[in-house]
Amino acid sequence: MPVLRLDHHVDGPPRLVAGVLRETAPSAEAVARAGARLTAPVRLLVAGDEVRVALPGGVLACRTRVTGAGVDGLRSELAAGPAAALQHVTRVIPDGCGTLVRDELAWAAPGGAAGRLSDPVLRRWGRRLLEARRDVVAGRVAELGRAPAVVGAAIVRDGRLLAAQRSYPAELAGRWELPGGGVEPGEPEPDALVRECAEELGARIVVGRRIGTDLPIGRRVLRIHTARLAPGSPEPEAREHRSLRWVGLRDVAALGWLDADRAVVAELVALLRG
């Protein structure tokens, strides 16, 4: 298969770059700059999600399925469309104080040898797409590099995860999230989590490590940390949420998570598996 590669440096941390790659809005903008149209049912991609790309002219379209999304990058492959095969792999590689992004697009045109006559056209369009993606990702990373942080706590006890059900605003009420909240200026993220969980849950926690990518949420960035209840902590109570639930491994993926929290479900499953 023909392979098109574009390496570029992004002035931002790898976790943030990996999170931006999962956003569908910047991807749609890059595709639009290349003359096509991308639509997706979610704002942050996880493995198994599909996006639709209508090619220039709008006559032909394909669906690609995400096969991997995490701190190491994003991978997708053809689910349906006019090509015989299509693979897009974007690797995120720590590079000193920034990030090296390695974008690779590979395809196989339909129709065997006759179909390969279209390869030069596809190569030119693919080059425009990767260059547009480079520029859009760099701009979004620069924007979010100055954005306020939000922190979430993946609190685990006896192999179960604490999930909180939103009570407001109306459009989010009933959906589930990890407890947490905004980081105040100059406040370390672990301290913000301890404070937020005391306010929201009436509980004391011990903060562990970060998991997953940074998760863009509008003009802010969500970061998830593992946590456990501190010895002697009161039992968590729903002071600001509709309800709380301790969920096991089999139930985590089935909850109606908010979009950003849904994007870390794979890491939550791995956390519960130990």
Image (cartoon, helix red, strand yellow):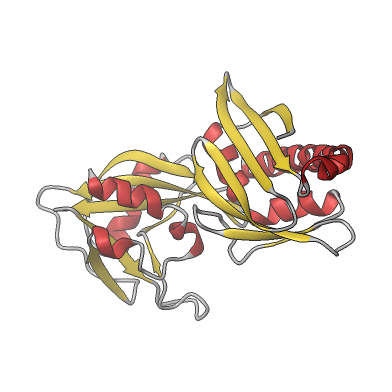
Give the farthest residue toward the top.
Answer: 96
Residue 20, position as x, y percentages in the image:
61, 45
Identify the residue at horizontal 85%, vertical 44% (top origin): 114
Q: Quadrant of residue 45?
A: bottom right
Identify the residue at horizontal 45%, vertical 76% (top origin): 168
Give the farthest residue toward the left.
Answer: 232
In the displayed structure, 245 sits above or below 27; it is below
Q: Nearer the viewer, residue 36 or 145?
A: 36
In the displayed structure, 262 sits above or below 6; it is below
Can residue 260 be seen? Answer: yes
Q: Quadrant of residue 164?
A: bottom left
Q: Is residue 148 left or right of residue 127?
A: left
In the displayed structure, 182 sits above or below 163; it is above
Q: In the rendered image, which quarter contains the C terminus?
A: top left
Q: Nearer the viewer, residue 23 or 59?
A: 59
Residue 12, position as x, y percentages in the image:
61, 32
Identify the residue at horizontal 56%, vertical 27% (top origin): 93
Residue 254, position as x, y percentages in the image:
35, 68
Q: Is residue 5 left or right of residue 145?
A: right
